[in-house]
Image (spheres, rainbow, N blue to C red):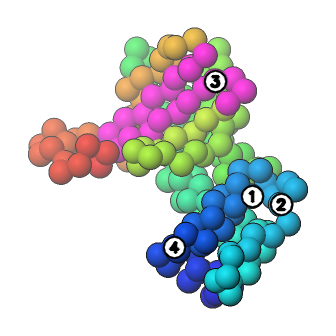
């Protein structure tokens, strides 16, 4: 496993780049039809399932960190609305979001911006949690379902922002 770690983090040669590309394909395809990835003449032979397992572990670690950051409970929103965020006891890492007229079963999603995101792709729902507020969007309808949702932790951040803006937008 150490050999795989050093291989994945080292600067790639052209043949190693090809091997990494195959490993990425294995991850996307779930390993379907791809049994191994070999680097030509590099002396490195790595099974795609090993790389796939390591990448999945890293990805799952990111998703678990996101799930651990989700504020739960009844969160008050603007105009008297609320969103109830409850961790799913049967599926760790998943959450049920409920409010007036909606219920969504959501999973954490890695975001390139660093914002904390939960998504229900089937319903098209998206929960975005920033440091000072959260919002619930329906991507299919292009509407905000709930905005200015503030948990007790976010209220503290919002208060701190009023007294002195953060150095980064997502803090």
Q: Which mark is residue 34?
A: 2
Q: Nearer the viewer, mark 4 or mark 3?
A: 4
Task: Give how far apart the Cα atoms at labels 4 and 2 are.
Answer: 21 Å
- The residue labelled by disc 1 is 26
Residue 52 percent across, percent down from the top left:
72, 65
Specify the quadrant of the image occupied by residue 92: bottom right
Residue at x-position 48% and y-position 17%: 144
Closer to the camera in the image, 36 or 140: 36
Q: Is residue 156 visible?
A: no
Q: Are marks 2 and 1 in contact (CB under 8 Å)?
A: yes
Give left or right: position of 3 versus 147: right
Per the image, is 124 magenta?
yes
Callout 3: SS: loop
- Name the N-terminal-most of marks 3 and 1: 1
Callout 1: SS: helix
Quick check: 31 above or below 103?
below
Quick check: 100 above or below 38?
above
- Name the N-terminal-most of marks 4 and 2: 4
Callout 2: SS: loop
Q: Which mark is residue 12?
A: 4
Q: Which residues are magenta?
A: 121-140
Residue 133 percent across, percent down from the top left:
37, 35
- The residue labelled by disc 3 is 124
Per the image, is 37 magenta?
no
């Amino acid at each position: 496993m150490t050999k795989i770690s050093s291989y994945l983090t080292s600067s790639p040669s052209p043949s190693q780049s090809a091997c990494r590309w195959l490993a990425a394909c294995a991850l996307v395809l779930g390993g379907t039809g791809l049994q191994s990835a070999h680097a030509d003449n590099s002396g490195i032979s790595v099974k795609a399932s090993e790389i796939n397992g390591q990448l999945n572990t890293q990805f799952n670690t990111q998703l678990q960190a996101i799930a651990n950051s989700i504020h739960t409970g009844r969160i008050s929103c603007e105009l008297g609305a609320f969103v109830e965020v409850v961790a799913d006891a049967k599926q760790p890492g998943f959450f049920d979001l409920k409010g007036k007229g909606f219920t969504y079963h959501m999973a954490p999603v890695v975001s390139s911006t660093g914002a904390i995101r939960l998504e229900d792709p089937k319903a098209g729902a998206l929960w975005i949690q920033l440091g000072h507020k959260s919002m619930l969007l329906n991507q299919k309808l292009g509407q905000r379902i709930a905005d200015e949702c503030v948990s007790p932790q976010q209220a503290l951040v919002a208060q701190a922002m009023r007294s002195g803006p953060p150095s980064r937008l997502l803090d």
